[in-house]
Image (cartoon, helix red, strand yellow):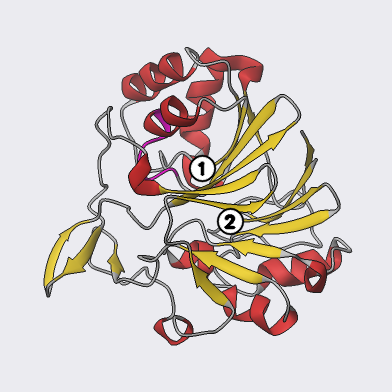
């Protein structure tokens, strides 16, 4: 199994672009699955430079309803006419950051026939590959909402991230989980899924308390999981966590290919 990082916040190659966003291309069992599309069409330009043909993608996943994960969705739909894009039923609801800025998806795309709503708690995409809806993950450990909000009955309320979804891949004896930003709490997610490998963001980029980050690292070590992280985790937080977690916490960047 290979995971190609088409785009994230950092890049070590002058030929590729980086942006605040995430897009991963998974190759497994002869299939290609796109996980998120970054904030713009830049992920597609990077894929072309990496000699990865997006028209051959079999299915696409939208991890949640924020622009930095679905901003390139329109470009993907232009390039690929066969893949279905799996989104949460709540993905196109309004979403705002702490300052009230709209960080949601383009509403013009919500009626696109190529975008399907994963209404069931668990959807089997292929044998051994399942999509899991966010509300399944119990909020056992408190997770700050970072001031993010949504609208309900015309009233702004804190976002509970019910629009988040996760891709679980069972490959032989190994369970690999992909999570876009882990807004429902990385500790809650790992506790629920108990994966052998987790790939995704931890959303710690605005955390300023080194003690809390160290405590989180120690709690994550209680699980036998190897973590690959990037995007919204934040380089400062990663540095603190790696001091405690060592090789159990690994990073990736735009243009990297992970063999798992």
Quadrant of the snapshot with the N terminus:
top right
Q: Is mark 1 on a helix, strand or loop?
A: loop
- Residue 48 lies in the magenta stretch: no
Residue lying at the far right of the rendered structure: 51
User: Marks 1/2: CA distance?
Assistant: 9 Å
Asked whether 11 or 69 is in front, the reply is: 69
Please tell me in which quadrant of the rendered image residue 77 appears.
bottom right
Q: How crowded is mark 2: few (under 14 residues within 10 Å), some or many (20 or more)?
A: many
Residue 199 location in percent, x, y?
Answer: 60, 38
Q: Residues within 10 Å of mark 1 (few under 14, many from 20)?
A: many
Quadrant of the snapshot with the C terminus:
top right
As drawn, is 139 to the left or to the right of 246? left
Residue 64 location in percent, x, y?
Answer: 44, 58
The residue tagged 2 is 22
Q: Residue 119 has which mark? A: none
The residue tagged 1 is 201
Magenta stretch, main secondary structure class: loop
For marks 1 and 2 on the same chain, the one whose residue lies earlier in the sequence: 2
Q: Do the residues labelled 1 and 2 touch (CB within 8 Å)?
A: yes
Asked whether 256 or 73 is in front, the reply is: 73
Residue drawn at point x = 61 percent, y = 16 percent:
246
Q: How many circles with numbers are drawn on the protein?
A: 2
Residue drawn at point x = 48 percent, y = 23 percent:
240
Vertical comparison of 127 with 242: above or below: below
Residue 258 location in percent, x, y?
Answer: 77, 39
- Residue 185 lies in the magenta stretch: yes
Vertical comparison of 92 with 216: above or below: below
As drawn, is 33 to the left or to the right of 234? right
- The stretch in magenta equals 182-187
Asked whether 105 or 103 is in front, the reply is: 105
Please tell me in which quadrant of the rendered image residue 200 appears.
top right
Residue drawn at point x = 28 percent, y = 65 percent:
96
């Amino acid at each position: 199994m290979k995971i190609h990082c088409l785009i994230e916040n950092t890049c070590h190659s002058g030929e590729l672009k980086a942006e605040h966003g995430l897009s991963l291309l998974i190759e497994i069992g002869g299939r290609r699955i796109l996980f998120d599309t970054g904030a713009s069409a830049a992920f597609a330009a990077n894929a072309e430079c990496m000699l990865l043909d997006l028209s051959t993608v079999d299915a696409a996943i939208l991890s949640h309803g924020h622009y930095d994960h679905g901003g390139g969705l329109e470009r993907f739909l232009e390039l690929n006419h066969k893949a279905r894009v799996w989104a949460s039923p709540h993905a196109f609801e309004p979403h705002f950051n702490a300052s009230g800025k709209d960080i949601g998806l383009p509403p013009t795309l919500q009626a696109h026939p190529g975008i399907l709503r994963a209404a069931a708690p668990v959807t089997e995409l292929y044998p051994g590959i399942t999509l899991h809806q966010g509300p399944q993950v119990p909020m056992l450990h408190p997770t700050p909402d970072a001031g993010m909000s949504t609208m309900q009955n015309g009233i702004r309320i804190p976002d509970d991230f019910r629009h988040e979804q996760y891709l679980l891949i069972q490959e032989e004896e190994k369970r690999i989980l992909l999570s876009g930003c882990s807004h429902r709490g990385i500790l809650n997610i790992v506790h629920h899924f108990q994966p052998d490998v987790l790939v995704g963001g931890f959303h710690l980029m605005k955390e300023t308390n080194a003690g809390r980050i160290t405590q989180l690292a120690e709690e994550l070590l209680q699980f036998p999981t190897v973590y690959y992280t990037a995007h919204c985790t934040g380089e400062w937080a990663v540095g603190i966590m790696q001091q405690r977690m060592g090789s159990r916490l690994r990073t990736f960047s735009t243009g990297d290919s992970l063999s798992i």
